[in-house]
Amino acid sequence: MGGQNSALLAASYHDWWSLAGVDALVGEAPAGWLDVPAANDVAAKPKITPSAEPEAAPLPVALQRREAPVEAISSGPVALPDEWDAFQAWLATSADVPGSQWDARRVLPVGRVEAPLMLMTAWPEIDDQREGELFTGPAGRLLDAMLRAIGLARADCYLASLAITRPPGGRIDDRDAAELDRLLWHHLRLAKPGRLLLVGSEITRMAAGLPLADTRGRLLDINQDGGKVDAVAIASPAMLLSRPAQKAAAWDSLKLFNRGR
């Protein structure tokens, strides 16, 4: 063995040992070429303390569990005044009046107790609510003409709406209906009218239990405080203005009050 290849082999050995850090006896730190890098040394790696599990993302609102609403404890039915003057004052001022929550302006009854004719509607029309008076404008003028046809004037009558304000959209839910039903019969008992004119489909259904179409030309017996009061039902004057064809049906009912005069 010898020659140029031997010289190259010797130089290679020398370089390898030099990189290993044994090219000198003393005075120099080993190069550490054969040391395991810290990144790969399991023993040298710092221990990682497991962190708390991340909180789960909240469920969509539609999937979240909802607690059942706690219903307010009812204090019982509202006390309705038994005297006429006290009842009228209660309608004008009390926050307990059913339907008073729908509008700040109340449309109150007009007239006297024991009037020969009581006109009752379910609630004010939109124009009536704005004006604060029942049967205003063109609808009121039509009503006055109808009353004259049976020999009466507005001043002779007691005019009232069951609810003293108009509900949103002109519709009520079952709970409001139950409260107004109780108010209806109490109001009639105190008013003691000679006869009763139901104005509109809603009050007809509440008081007579019939759709307005089934009352045409019929004298209705409304049981009231152990007795009966004669009643007829007609569409509201505002409806008659918008649908004149229904005037004939209204007259068929209204003219029943002409009998026995």
Image: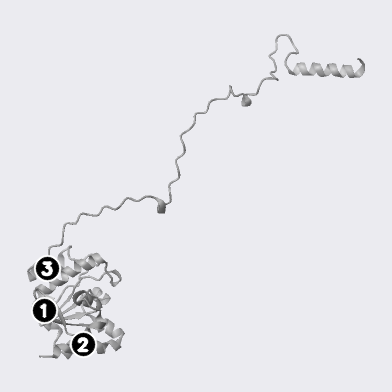
- State which quarter of the image contains the N terminus: top right
Residue type marked 1? Lys
Q: What secondary structure is found at the residue carrying circle 1?
A: strand
Q: On the image, which quarter does residue 224 sit in?
A: bottom left
Mark found first going from the N terminus, 3 or 1: 3
Which mark identifies residue 89? 3
In the picture provided, is 61 more to the left or to the right than 73? right
Which mark identifies residue 217? 2
Tag 2–tag 3 contact (CB < 8 Å) = no
Q: Categorize mark 2 by other alpha carbons within 10 Å: few (<14), some (14-19), many (20+).
A: some
Q: Residue at x 30, y 71 (%)?
A: 169
Q: On the image, which quarter does residue 116 sit in?
A: bottom left
Say if 190 sits above or below 216 in the image: above
Spatial CA distance of label 3 from label 1 is 27 Å
Discs 2/3, front: 2
Q: Categorize mark 1 by other alpha carbons within 10 Å: few (<14), some (14-19), many (20+).
A: few
Taking the image as drawn, is residue 16 in sight?
A: yes
> Farthest residue toward the top?
26
Q: Nearer the viewer, residue 253 or 12?
A: 253
Q: Nearer the viewer, residue 137 or 54?
A: 54
Mark found first going from the N terminus, 2 or 3: 3
Spatial CA distance of label 2 from label 1 is 18 Å
**What is the x, y in percent for residue 247?**
26, 88
Mark 1, residue position: 228
Residue type marked 2? Gly
Q: Residue at x 10, y 66 (%)?
A: 81
Discs 3/1, front: 1
Q: Residue at x 41, y 52 (%)?
A: 63
